[in-house]
Amino acid sequence: MRMSSVKKIITIGEILVEIMAKEPGEGFRSPIDLVGPFPSGAPAIFIDQVAKLGQPCGIVSCVGDDDFGAMNTERLRRDGVDIAAIAVEPGAATGSAFVRYRKDGQRDFVFNIKHSACGLIRQTPDADALIDSADHLHVMGSSLFSDDIVTLIRRAIGRIKTKGGTVSFDPNIRKEILGLPGMIEALDHVLGQTDLFLPSGPELFLLTGATDEVPAVREILARGVRAIVLKRGADGATYYEHGAPLHMPAFRVEEVDPTGAGDSFGATFVTCWLRDMAPREALRLATASGARAVRVKGPMEGTSTRAELDAFLANHDSGVPSGRLAPRHGTRGRSRDRTSPP
Amino acid sequence: MRMSSVKKIITIGEILVEIMAKEPGEGFRSPIDLVGPFPSGAPAIFIDQVAKLGQPCGIVSCVGDDDFGAMNTERLRRDGVDIAAIAVEPGAATGSAFVRYRKDGQRDFVFNIKHSACGLIRQTPDADALIDSADHLHVMGSSLFSDDIVTLIRRAIGRIKTKGGTVSFDPNIRKEILGLPGMIEALDHVLGQTDLFLPSGPELFLLTGATDEVPAVREILARGVRAIVLKRGADGATYYEHGAPLHMPAFRVEEVDPTGAGDSFGATFVTCWLRDMAPREALRLATASGARAVRVKGPMEGTSTRAELDAFLANHDSGVPSGRLAPRHGTRGRSRDRTSPP
C-alpha cells in the first residue's frame, strides 16, 4: 500500500457575500424580506469544504475593508483555510450577490463582482508564496472574469504543474461571463492543463466537438485529462476514466438551498482523490457532501467535516438507484448556474 | 404681487439602493434579517421630494443595468423627475448602502458607492442638456466623492449662475468622505457660489473660522450666501438672513426611520423658496416634510405631495415651542450622518 503525502490544495477567485430573498419571486425591483450576509463565492465555498475535511489549503482572493470582507475572512480562517493571500483593499467593496428563487426554481441575481474587490485579485507576494506552497490548484470557471485573474491562474497552473502538482477544474460558468472576450480561450487553456474535470450537466460539452456524452468524455480524456466527474444534480454523478464509468445516485434529502452544493461536492471529491481514495468511495463522500449542503440555507453554511459525512452516510442508503434526491423544481435550469448542486 | 416663473430644479449625484437591517445591533458580520432594496441616495431622495411637490426637476446620475437601477429610475420617473440624464452603465453595479441602527441610535453602514455606477457619473450630452434647462442646482456634499463629479458640479454651478440661476447646498457630509484629497476645497468652492445653505447641526462650522452660531452665520452671509437654514434634528430648524432669525420647532411624531428626512426637508424648503414663499411658511412646510419622512421606513418612502403636507399640518400644531419631536436616541450622533433629519 502506497502512503500518500498530505497535499496542499489552493484555489484562486472570488469571495462574496450572498443576500437571499426570503420568498420566491422575480428579481429585486421592490423592497422584500431578505436574509444575509452569508459567506459565499464558489471558490470560497470550495476551499472552506476542503478545510473542513482537514486538508491543508488556502485561497488567493481580495475583499474590501468592510464587515462583509471581515466576515468571510474570519469564517475561512476559523474553518482552517490559509488566509494570508486574501488581500484587503481599502476603498473597494467586498463582492456581493443578491439571489432570489423564482417559483420554477430558476434564480434571479444582482451581482457586484467585477468592479468589487474581486476585480482587484492579482499577483502579490502573498499570492506567490501560497501558490509556491501548493500541490494542487482548483480552478472555478466563474473566477475567470478579469484579465488579471486569468493571468494569475495561468501562471499558477504553470508553476504547480512544473513541480509535478495537479489541477482540477469546475467550469461553473454563468452565461453572462461566457460572452466575455477571450473567455472560451481561457477555459480551453485550463482544460488542456486539467487532471480532474468536474463539469455540471451540459458544461461537459462546453469545449468539445462531440455533443453526446460518451464521445465528449473520450475527447476530453484524449486531451490528457485523467478523470471526469459529471455532476447531474438530482440525477447523481458519474465518474469517468479510461475504464468503465461509475455512477452514484444522489441521496434523498429535503432541499432547502442548492447554492453551494456543487462546490461542496467538488471539494470533497478533489480532497478524496488527492488522498488516493478509490473513486467509488470518493464519489460516495462527495455525494454526501452535496446532499448535506442542500439541506441548509446559505451557500457556505452546509459544508461538512468528515465526521458529519460519516454520520450522514450511516443514516442514508447510498449506491442504490432508488437513493435519489427528491424531485426538485428546475434542477436542469439551475445546473447552468454558478453554484449548482452535484 | 410678483408672479414667480416656474423654476426647474436639478441635482447631480448618487442613486443608491438601501438595504436595512430589521433589528438594531452592530454591523454586518453574520446573517441577519434585512429588508430592501429601497430607492435611496441623498440627491435622489431630494429630487423625488421636489417632484412630488409638482416642481419641474431632474437628476444627473448613473446606475447599473440591473434591477436596483431599474427600480430607482422607475420610482423617480413615476414621481415626475426628468430621468433623461440618468446614464445606465452596462457591467457596473448600481450603488448600494447597507444600514443598521445600533441601540444608541448611531448607524453602521456598508457602502458601495465610489466603485459602483455612481463613480461613473460624468459629463454627457444628456447631462449638459439637463444642466442647460435648469434654473436652480442643489448640491449634496455627499456627492463630491470623485474628481469627475466635482468637475461636473463646478461646471454646472458656473453655467447656471452665469444665466442668473441659483444654487443651494447641503453639506450632508460623512466623515469618511471629508478626508478625501481636495474635499474641503471642493466644499468651500460650492459654498462660495451658494445662495441658500442648508447645514445640519455642526456642519454650520465646517467651513467657518467662527465656532459659535451667530458669528458663523455672519461669516457665511458675508460671503454672499443669501439665506441659511440650520437643521437641528429634533430641535427644529432656524432660518437666517440679514434680519432676525426665525425658528421653527419640529413636530411631535413617532420616529420610525430618520434616513431621508433631512433630504425631504431640504427639498421642500428649496422648492418653496424658489416659489418666493415667505420663509416662515417655507419652514413650516419643510418641517412637515421632515416629520412625515421619519414616520415611514425607507429613505425615499416618506416623500410627500403638497396635499399630504397640508393634511399633516391640518392635524398637527406647529410654530409653537411645545410642538417638538418626541425625544429620540442619539439625534446628535445622527446629525453627522448622510441623510439626517432636519
Image (spheres, coloured by chain):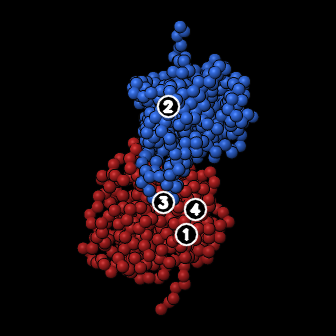
Chain colours: A red, B blue
Tell me if residue A9 comes above or below residue B54 in the rendering: below
Label 2 chain ID: B
Locate residue A28 relative to residue B138 in the image: left or right. Answer: left
Residue at x-position 43% and y-position 65%: A301
| Residue drawn at point x = 42 percent, y = 28 percent | B316
Q: Residues within 10 Å of mark 2 (few under 14, many from 20)?
A: few
Q: Residue at x 56, y 21 (%)?
A: B279
**Residue A61: numbered disc:** 4
Question: Few, some or many C-alpha atoms within 10 Å of disc 4 (few <14, some 14-19, many ≥20)?
Answer: many
Label 2 residue SS? loop
**Three-letter code, disc 3:** Ser
Q: Which residue is nearer to you in this view: A318 or A149?
A: A318
Q: Position of residue B307 (x, y in %)?
A: 40, 24
Residue for badge 2: B322
Q: Secondary structure at mark 1?
A: helix
Give amino acid for label 1: Arg
Q: Quadrant of residue A164?
A: bottom right
- Which residue matches tag 1? A77
The residue type indicated by label 4 comes to Ser
Q: Chain of mark 1?
A: A
Q: Are marks 1 and 3 on the same chain?
A: no
Q: Which residue is mark 3?
A: B30
Which residue occupies the extreme right position in the image?
B209
Answer few, some or many: residues within 10 Å of disc 1's Cα (few below 14, many 20 plus, some between 14 and 19): some
Estimate the spatial distance between the alpha carbons at disc 2 and disc 1, rounded to whole Å.
Answer: 56 Å
Between B139 and A277, the one nearer to me in the picture: B139
What is the C-alpha distance between the residues marked 4 and 1?
13 Å
Q: Label 4, secondary structure: give it.
A: strand
Is residue B144 placed above or below B278 in the rendered structure? below
Q: Nearer the viewer, mark 1 or mark 3?
A: 3
User: What whole-number distance in Å separates the C-alpha atoms at marks 4 and 2?
Assistant: 57 Å
- Corner quadrant of residue A156: bottom right
